[in-house]
Every structure is written in C-alpha cells, then in structure tokens.
Image (cartoon, helix red, strand yellow):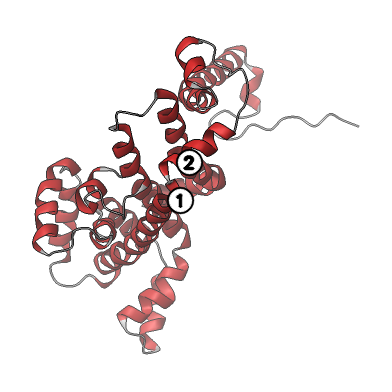
Amino acid sequence: MAKKRLQHTGVIRDYDMHSLPVRIGYAFIYVLCFIMVIFAVFPLIWVILAGFKDLKEFMSSTKIMPNAFNFGLFLKTWSQLDLAKNYLNSLISVAGSVVCALIFNGLLGYGLSILKPRGYKLVKRLVMLSLLVPATISIVPLFMNIQRLGMGNSFLPLWLSYGANAMYVVLFIQFFESLPQSMIEASRIDGCTPIQTFFHIVLPLSKPICAVVAIFAINAAWSDFLLPYLVLRGGPLQTVMVRLFVFSTEQTVNADTMMRSVVFSMIPPIILFILFQKQLTENSVSVGIKG
C-alpha cells in the first residue's frame, strides 16, 4: 500500500516542498511561529501557576512550577472577593452589549448597504471618519451625556455604547453588500416592511458576521474597565474588572491573592477563545474576502 503523501495547501504547494530552500523557509516559519506562541502564552501560564503559590512561596521562590497545586487557595480568594455577584453583573453587561451590538449596528449597516436612503453616503463617510477618533477622546463627552440623562449607576449606557460601534457597522456593511439582492427584492414583493426584511431575511442570512460581532462584543464588554468604573460608581453593580481594581487598591491585599484574582478575570475570555477560535478566524477571513 502506497504511503499517503502530505498535502500542502495555500501559498506553498506539495510540489514546492521538493525544493531545499522552500523546505528550509518552511521550517523557519514554523520555528518563528513557535517562538511567537511561547512569548504569547508564557505570561498566561505563569500567572495561572503563580496563583497556586502561597505568599511565602510567591515572594521567595523563583521557580515557575509551584510546590503543590492547592486549589483551596483559589476558593479562598473567590470567597474573599465575593466574585459570584460580580460575575453575574459582568454577564448582564455582556448580554445586553451583545444584543445592542447586533441589533443597532446591524440596522445601521442594513440601512447604509441595502436601503440606501437619501444622504446615506454622508452617513457612511461619517461612520468611517469616526474610526479615526480614539475611544479615549470620546469618553469624557460620553460620560457627561450619561450623567445629564440620569443613566448613571445602571447597565443601560454600557449596553448602548456597544450599540454605536463604527467597526461593527463597517463589518455589517461589507457583509450585507454581498447578500443576494434577489431574496431581498422577493421579500419586498411579498409585502414585508424593511424592518421585517431585516429580522426575517437579512439576519438569518448573516449568521457568520453576527457570530464575529458577537464574539468581539463579548470580549470587549467583559474586558472593559473605564466606562463601567465611571458609570457604575463602585456600587453593587460592579463588574469583575471594576471589582478587581477596587480590590487591588485595598491595603490588605497580598501579591499572591491579587494574582489569583487576575486568573478569575481571564477564565471567560480563554473559554471563549477555545470554543470559537476556528469560527472566529474563518468568518473574519470570509468577511474580508466578501468585503
């Protein structure tokens, strides 16, 4: 039985592997990628392993591996921070942010790419121009408007801030422009209103881009600190990131306890990446090609 040959796809074909310079370059790329992975993953692994050390071992030992994997230390830190309610607050913030990111940005992208009302080109240019404005510049007027509207100490402004994201709008525009116009015209002939067409035709056909935007929104909403810290005012609605900052300012916090609290903040993004990394990369590439 003939040995099955390894098939190489992409820029380097199977035939190219017969060349010695190509094989050397191929090996060099693999080594370079491996080194980059080590630099990217090592801090994460170090933080997790450091969480298993008590204060004495953490301050005196230079070894990466702990003397013992004591999960009781993590349970003690969890109860000390009372992170259960903060996790719930973060989940509420993330859920609302994802819904607003999909609905509001999707509606604007739908209007600019499919409906195209009068003046849509100007609005589209303004959306693209807003990508050049750093987010830190807009935080002051955004917070002032939130205070004037009396929406402080609530999740609503956090949700709405993700419902007005220029990057998400651009992603929706690029994807919607690739949709078959015949199906949209057929819905209009059947008597569907523009809103009905959006929810019954466009969104079901846009599951790939919706998944990409949802993953981006989840990661951004979970990791966001500044706006939740300003809006929630350190009250009972604190998210995990805000709680960790408040916890780090307390004088009684030890370095090992703070390290374990950081691990708790990293768990959801890690799980999200593990579960959806393939879908995220494939959909991001497909959206870029269609755009």
| Relative height, residue 45 to residue 131 (above, below) | above
Judging from the image, what secondary structure is the residue with disc 1 in? Answer: helix
Instruction: Rate crowding at label 1 as few (under 14), some (14 to 19) or many (20 or more) other CA atoms within 10 Å.
Output: few
Which residue occupies 33% across, 54% down?
171
Q: Which amino acid does label 1 sit on?
A: Ala
Mark identifier at residue 196: none
The residue closer to the viewer here, 97 or 176, is 97
249 left or right, relative to 80: left
Which residue occupies 38% across, 52% down?
90
The residue closer to the viewer here, 160 or 68, is 68
Instruction: Rate crowding at label 2 as few (under 14), some (14 to 19) or many (20 or more) other CA atoms within 10 Å.
Output: some
| Relative height, residue 222 to residue 187 (above, below) | above
| Relative height, residue 112 to residue 236 (above, below) | below
Residue 59 position, x and y percent, is 45, 14
- Mark 1 or 2 closer to N-term? 2
Residue sitting farthest toward the front: 252
Q: Which amino acid does label 2 sit on?
A: Trp
Numbered label tally: 2
> Based on the displayed image, in which of its 4 quarters is residue 122 positioned?
bottom left
Instruction: Tell whether label 2 touches label 1 (CB within 8 Å).
Output: yes
Residue 154 position, x and y percent, is 25, 61
Mark identifier at residue 84: 1
Residue corresponding to mark 2: 78
24 left or right, relative to 176: right
> Based on the displayed image, in which of its 4 quarters is residue 241 positioned?
top left
Q: Is residue 183 visible?
A: no
Residue 183 position, x and y percent, is 43, 76
| Relative height, residue 185 to residue 56 (above, below) | below
Judging from the image, what secondary structure is the residue with disc 2 in? Answer: helix
Q: In which quarter of the image is the N terminus?
A: top right
Real-space CA distance between mark 1 and mark 2, rounded to the nearest whole angstrom: 8 Å
Q: Can residue 241 be seen in this view?
A: yes
